[in-house]
Image (cartoon, rainbow, N blue to C red):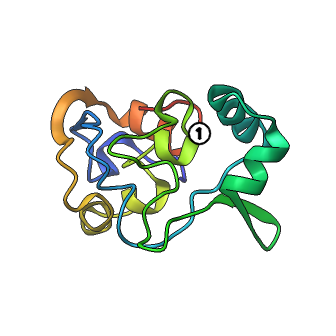
Amino acid sequence: MAKRERTEFWFAGGIHFECQRCGRCCRGEPGYVWVTTDEIRRMAEHLGIPATEFVERYVRRQGTRLSLKEHENGDCVFWKEDCVVYACRPAQCRSFPFWAHALKSKGAFKAVSRGCPGVGKGRLYTVEDILAIASGLRDT
């Protein structure tokens, strides 16, 4: 995100958020959960399997990028009434709902976080927190 004065952000007052581990952001609509080789290694270690096996079972290639596979219904391959890899989940998951494209406007944020019971609860994330999360320097 481009550097702007703090008061220019629609979320200048901060946003309360605490993950409720409900899986609403993990289920339903198909999409991509982009993963890095470091994230693959960490999740494989967490599951106690070699990274090569992890890739064969849980990863798909999309052009030059890697994404977690999904079940036919669109659910993340790791959603089983709870996130199986929550402790080492990918950055894309750790940064929800503070994705850069979602922060461009209040409407975009509402669209991305729709139905998320964690928005409005828990800790108050300041503008600085939110920008650090959106830029990958921190996570929720």
Residue at 22 percent of width and 52 percent of height: 116
Is 118 above or below relative to 29? above
Left or right of 109, for residue 91:
right
Q: Is residue 62 above or below residue 120?
A: below
User: Left or right: 14 with respect to 97?
Assistant: left
The residue lying toward the viewer, choosing from 60 and 130, is 60
Q: Which residue is mark 1?
A: 136
Quadrant placement of the C terminus? top left
Residue drawn at point x = 44 percent, y = 70 percent: 74
Residue 41 vertical position relative to residue 60 in the rendered view, above or below: above
In the rendering, at what x and y percent does residue 66 appear?
73, 59
Q: Residue at x 32, y 50 (%)?
A: 9
Q: Secondary structure at mark 1?
A: loop
Q: Position of residue 99 (x, y in %)?
A: 45, 53
Number of numbered discs on residues = 1
Percent across and percent down for residue 3 are 52, 47
Front-most of residues 47 and 16: 47
Q: Position of residue 40 (x, y in %)?
A: 72, 41
Dividing the picture into quadrants, the one containing residue 110 is bottom left
Q: Amino acid at mark 1?
A: Gly
Q: Is residue 117 left or right of residue 78?
A: left
Structural crowding at the residue carrying mark 1, measured as other residues with C-alpha within 10 Å and reported as few (<14), some (14–19) or many (≥20): some
Q: Residue at x 38, y 56 (%)?
A: 103
Q: Is residue 8 left or right of residue 134?
A: left
